[in-house]
């Protein structure tokens, strides 16, 4: 995959000690993922409660394997016509404190993939004044036409401790229920607390390279 310049800060992420001293950092709510362009700029919201019964809207019941981990369907939503979201967690994990999550989303739209990704990039760039680690890079696979957006975000918990979240978003064109649109196949990895976040940053280069490889080697979910 070739790396595309996207205007995001590509510099080395600051340490937790540096971020703690940053007077511009304000506590913010954690974020949800979405590929809908109209929703991407308002992603800051609480995690959904774990439902007892989860509807498989997309015909992807799981488990989904990424790397050496199996993920089972844990939450789903159909927030608007033609837009479906499903989340998968390792067995026994809960969304409120997950460390690793897989997401599959479909948006029925004639919007080009580049426009979908541009909306996500705007959200990341808009966070830079308040998020000291907001950072992104975009990769394109010329053979498949797919894109992978690799980005890092942070927030603070109720005790003032950092939560770091790295995401790998794999975008492709897709068809579902007779409609053309975009599929998002993604992984999200978190570290909780200053000490864990410091270690997470220290190993980030190697970690995200491996997880991006895991994501791109995994089979793209078939929507049914």
Image: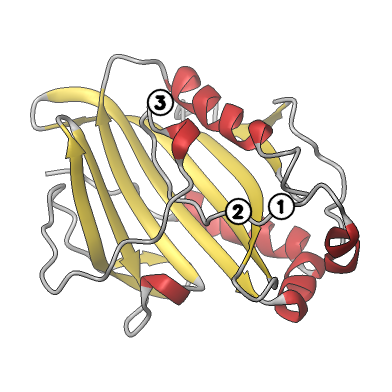
Q: Which of 72 and 22 is in front in this view?
A: 22
Residue at the image point whose x is 25% and y is 68% from the top: 74
Q: Answer above or below: position of 37 versus 65.
A: above
Residue at the image point whose x is 57% and y is 39% from the top: 149
Residue 1 seen from this side:
no
Relative to 213, is 56 on the left or the right?
left
Relative to 79, is 25 on the left or the right?
right
Judging from the image, what secondary structure is the residue with disc 3 in?
A: loop
Residue 37 is tagged as 3
Q: How crowded is mark 2: few (under 14 residues within 10 Å), some or many (20 or more)?
A: some
Say if mark 1 contacts mark 2, CB within 8 Å: yes
Q: Which of marks 3 and 2 is nearer the N terminus?
A: 2
Q: Mark 2 points at which residue?
A: 28
Residue at the image point whose x is 89% and y is 68% from the top: 17
x then y, percent, for residue 222: 22, 45
Residue at the image point whose x is 27% and y is 47% from the top: 85
Q: Name the residue under label 1.
A: 26
Instruction: Give the Cα distance between marks 3 and 2.
Output: 21 Å
- How is the protein colored in the picture? secondary structure
Q: Answer above or below: position of 182 versus 193.
A: above
């Amino acid at each position: 995959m070739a790396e595309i310049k996207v205007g995001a800060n590509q510099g080395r992420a600051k340490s937790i000690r540096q971020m703690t001293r940053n007077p511009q950092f304000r506590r913010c709510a954690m974020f949800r993922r979405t590929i809908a362009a109209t929703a991407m700029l308002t992603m800051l919201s609480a995690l959904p409660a774990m439902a007892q019964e989860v509807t498989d809207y997309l015909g992807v019941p799981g488990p989904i394997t990424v790397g050496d981990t199996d993920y089972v369907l844990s939450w789903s939503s159909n927030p608007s016509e033609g837009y479906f979201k499903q989340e998968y967690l390792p067995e026994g994990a809960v969304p409120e404190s997950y460390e690793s999550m897989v997401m599959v989303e479909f948006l029925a739209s004639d919007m080009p993939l580049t426009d979908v990704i541009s909306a996500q990039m705007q959200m990341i760039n808009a966070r830079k004044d308040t998020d000291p680690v907001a950072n992104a890079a975009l990769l394109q696979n010329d053979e498949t036409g797919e894109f992978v957006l690799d980005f890092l975000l942070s927030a603070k918990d109720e005790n003032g401790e950092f939560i770091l979240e790295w995401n790998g978003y794999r975008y492709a064109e897709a068809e579902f229920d007779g409609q053309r649109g975009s599929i998002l196949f993604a992984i999200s990895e978190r570290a909780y607390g200053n000490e864990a976040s410091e270690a997470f940053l220290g190993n980030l280069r190697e970690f995200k390279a491996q997880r991006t490889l895991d994501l791109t080697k995994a089979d793209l979910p078939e929507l049914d």
